[in-house]
Image (cartoon, rainbow, N blue to C red):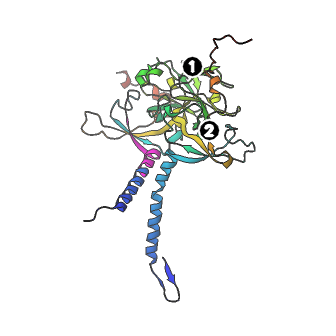
């Protein structure tokens, strides 16, 4: 009986290598499927079990990012970690850095010897209006009470942006089936509102 | 082989369709290796041409701007903070322009207090967690003294070897630019131990 020779293994190994490299290329530069967790983007994203599709092709390195986009960036204070927040300011925009209580860095997974050492970028600038410098963006979590975002890290360089979240699929730990994909849109719903859109109605007083 | 032509035999050995199929198959197989090359270029090692004079005289010492150094960019382990040593030259994305990259030298690590230079607004600053303080060897360079400490997420590659020009072929020196012992508070120069013997008159 003929055994599988050298040629069989090298041909299949080279096919495997090429397939893995192609998938990696798609995953890094086109579209990625990632799992999110944490409280900082409630109610847009669930605390656990939300799986998101990231568009990298158009939005890597902060290209074509607009205010209101939910994006994933590399965490500035930790390596090999990513965080998911919403863009609140583009370069040149004036944003308000509210005086949030500084969350203890330990809860964010900071190594022990650096606990208490924040980026210092917002020291003395909380409670003030800041102009976002060129090449940087201002990010905010939707659940601002429980979110470490630009109020702690300061303006974040656009080159840290990994991608934009397009769709989220919720498959919770106690659910048998995944939920229907939800389009994660910008929360800028309408820009052509007028005064009459904000007048109280009979319904609103109930 | 498309055809044999000689005095004895003049006929095609393969049809046009077969040749077309062979070419198409070869081209597709060639293309399938492109993602592997792309992976190596982005995550292992690639060649980089250094532009600009911010690392003069270590890199690009010619002032005419025509001779550019060609170096190897090592991308393996590039995002691993603890693998960096003081004095290493790194390539990072420009914090002020995400499409561009800059080449600078690491002066200080997280938690260290740096004595800043003009035009930084404070006189000393503590480097945040997982950030580097980088400076160009040229005193006129735009570096951390302008845009502050940079996060590890911006670092793309290390520059360790000069490939061209051949007379400076070899490792990039780890010293050049500001001496970290004067830049970093607490690093300091070694003190010579005091002699306990009386000195001879």
The secondary element bearing badge 1 is classed as: loop
User: What's the residue at 54%, 19% (across, down)?
Assistant: A126
CA distance for labels 2 and 1: 30 Å
Q: Is residue A7 left or right of residue B90?
A: left
Q: Which mark is residue B64?
A: none
Q: Is residue B159 left or right of residue A69?
A: right
User: What's the residue at 46%, 39% (across, down)?
Assistant: A164
What residue sits right under mark 2 in the picture?
B103
Q: Nearer the viewer, residue A77 or A89?
A: A77
Mark 2 neighbour density, 10 Å: few (under 14) some (14–19) many (20 or more): many
Q: Are marks 2 and 1 in contact (CB under 8 Å)?
A: no
Q: Please say whether residue B107 is visible from this viewpoint.
A: yes
What residue sits right under mark 1 in the picture?
A125
Q: Residue furthest front?
A: B200
User: What's the residue at 35%, 41% (across, down)?
Assistant: A181
Q: Is residue A177 left or right of residue B85?
A: left
The secondary element bearing badge 2 is classed as: strand
The quarter of the image holding the C terminus of chain B is top right
The chain holding disc 2 is B
The stretch of residues the image draws in magenta is A22-37
Mark 1 neighbour density, 10 Å: few (under 14) some (14–19) many (20 or more): some
Q: Position of residue A70 (x, y in %)?
A: 45, 35
């Amino acid at each position: 009986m003929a055994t599988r020779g050298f040629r069989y293994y090298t041909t299949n190994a080279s096919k495997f290598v090429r397939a893995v490299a192609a998938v990696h290329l798609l995953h890094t530069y086109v579209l990625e499927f990632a799992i999110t967790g944490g409280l900082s983007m409630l109610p847009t994203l669930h605390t656990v079990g939300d799986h998101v599709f990231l568009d990298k092709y158009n939005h890597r390195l902060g290209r074509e990012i607009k205010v209101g986009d939910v994006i994933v960036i590399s965490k500035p204070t930790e390596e090999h970690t990513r965080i998911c927040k919403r863009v609140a300011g583009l370069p040149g925009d004036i944003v308000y850095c509210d005086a949030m209580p500084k969350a203890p860095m330990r809860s964010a997974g900071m190594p022990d010897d650096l606990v208490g050492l924040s980026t210092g970028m917002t020291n003395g600038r909380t409670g003030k209006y800041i102009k976002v410098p060129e090449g940087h963006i201002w990010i905010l979590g939707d659940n601002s009470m429980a979110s470490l975002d630009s109020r702690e890290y300061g303006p974040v360089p656009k080159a840290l942006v990994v991608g934009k979240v397009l769709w989220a699929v919720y498959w919770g730990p106690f659910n048998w089936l995944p939920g229907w994909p939800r389009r994660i849109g910008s929360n800028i719903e309408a820009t052509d509102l007028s005064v009459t859109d904000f007048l109280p109605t009979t319904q609103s007083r109930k | 082989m498309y055809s044999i032509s000689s005095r004895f035999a003049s006929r095609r050995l393969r049809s046009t369709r077969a040749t077309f199929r062979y070419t198409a198959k070869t081209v597709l197989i060639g293309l399938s290796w492109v993602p592997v090359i792309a992976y190596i270029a982005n995550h292992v090692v690639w060649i980089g041409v250094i532009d600009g004079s911010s690392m003069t005289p270590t890199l690009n010492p010619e002032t005419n701007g025509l001779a550019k150094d060609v170096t190897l960019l090592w991308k393996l382990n590039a995002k691993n903070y603890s693998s960096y040593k003081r004095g290493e030259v790194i390539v990072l994305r420009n914090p002020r322009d995400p499409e561009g990259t800059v080449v600078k030298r690491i002066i200080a690590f997280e938690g260290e207090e740096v004595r800043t230079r003009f035009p930084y607004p404070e006189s000393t600053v503590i480097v945040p967690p997982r950030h580097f303080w980088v400076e160009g060897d040229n005193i006129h360079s735009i570096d951390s003294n302008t845009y502050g400490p940079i996060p590890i997420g911006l670092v793309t590659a290390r520059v360790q070897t000069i490939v061209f020009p051949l007379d400076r072929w070899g490792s990039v020196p780890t010293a050049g630019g500001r001496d970290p012992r004067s830049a970093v508070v607490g690093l300091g120069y070694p003190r010579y131990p005091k002699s306990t013997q009386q000195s001879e008159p």
